[in-house]
Amino acid sequence: MNIQRVSDTLGRLKAPAFRLEQLRRAVFRETSASYEEISVLPVSLRQALGQAGPLLSVSAQAVLVSGTQRAHKASLKLCDGQEVETVLLRPSPTRWTTCISCQVGCAIGCTFCATGLMGFSRHLTPEEITDQVLFWRQYMKQRGLEGRLDNVVYMGMGEPFACYDNVSESLKILMDQRQFAVGARHISVSTSGLVPQIERFGKDFPQVNLAVSLHAADDELRDRLVPINRAYPLARLGKALRTYLRSSSRKVFLEYVLLRGENDRPEDAERLIQYVKSLGPLELLHVNLILFNQTETRHGACSEESARVFHKRLRNADIRATVRQNLGRDIQGACGQLIAQAKH
């Protein structure tokens, strides 16, 4: 929902100023899914708003639910016919998180990620980004799902810092108390390591969480797994992260997908330990270990036992680390599995 466009429409219709606040309350507090549902507005005004355009800029083509009921994946169609995927996750009984997309496809080309296989088509608009959150809030209300959706992670399709301006505007909308009212510390933005934008992000959004898709702690391997490393190698990335940590004093999350025989060996753990220790205070650094979710790539998943051993090595070296919950794998909605048909 583009609140400015709605405001302009109300202005053209000569509606009283208080109508905008009524509409805003209905959409963002009462989770009305259509203009027709907003009964405080006159019927004629609801009809005029509906004729001007839909409340949401996205429409669900399909929703899959995992066997555990803790992961829901939606394929959303955009106004130009392109599609993106977004996921709703329930990591705890009362807490919901949505993983949202910011691009149709991705140009970074991480070799283990399904999104990279579809190529890159375009950036999402700020409205298309935030409407994914609105869609899931409406979905939860319609299906009577208990709990509150108040955690948002930019870890779906696309590289957020490759469309920095649109992502920046979407963050402002999500944090706006008159709209989504999501707390800054309940939002995480992930990047594969675009250094100039990391520096900018630390100044623009010091309270929003930063996650970095690391996946390897030596340049030769990371060049292959995360090709953006050729432009921003580990030394330069490390310098940017040290600056970020000094200026923000906010925790940085380092994402590390475990790939069998590639980055899950004892020597890989040791390189990761040394790299993390070079970045700054260990209490501000947290490694999220991710079990590889199978995609149409050449990579393989390490065993859960190997993941436990790798995790223990980090913990024994005083590195804060977690083996992340793997929700949504059975619906192709887990980390690295999102993919949609791009139209070029």
Image (cartoon, grey):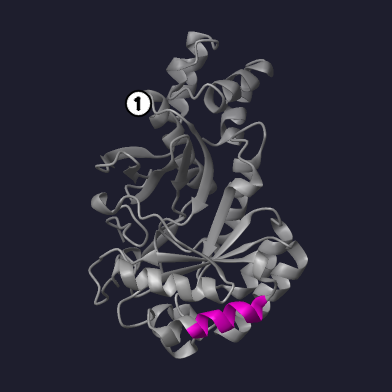
Magenta stretch: residue 276 in it?
A: yes
Residue 228, placed above or below residue 254: below
Q: Residue at x 64, y 42 (%)?
A: 183
Q: Residue at x 47, y 44 (%)?
A: 97
Callout 1: SS: helix
Q: Residue at x 76, y 69 (%)?
A: 246
What segment is highlighted magenta in the picture? 270-279
Residue 40, placed above or below residue 313: above
Q: Position of residue 255 (x, y in %)?
A: 48, 67
Q: How many marks?
A: 1
In the image: residue 130, left or right of residue 184: left
Residue 251, placed above or below residue 91: below
Look at label 1 and name its amino acid. Arg
Q: Residue furthest front?
A: 316
Q: Quick one: 321 or 64, which is closer to the camera?
A: 321
Q: Position of residue 19 (x, y in %)?
A: 62, 17
Q: Residue at x 53, y 44 (%)?
A: 151
Q: Position of residue 342 (x, y in %)?
A: 30, 58
Quarter occupied by residue 277: bottom right
| Magenta highlight: main SS | helix
Q: Is residue 29 visible?
A: yes
Q: Position of residue 322 (x, y in %)?
A: 48, 62
Q: Is residue 223 visible?
A: no
Instruction: Find disc 1 in the rendering and name its residue.
Output: 143
Q: Residue furthest right?
A: 247
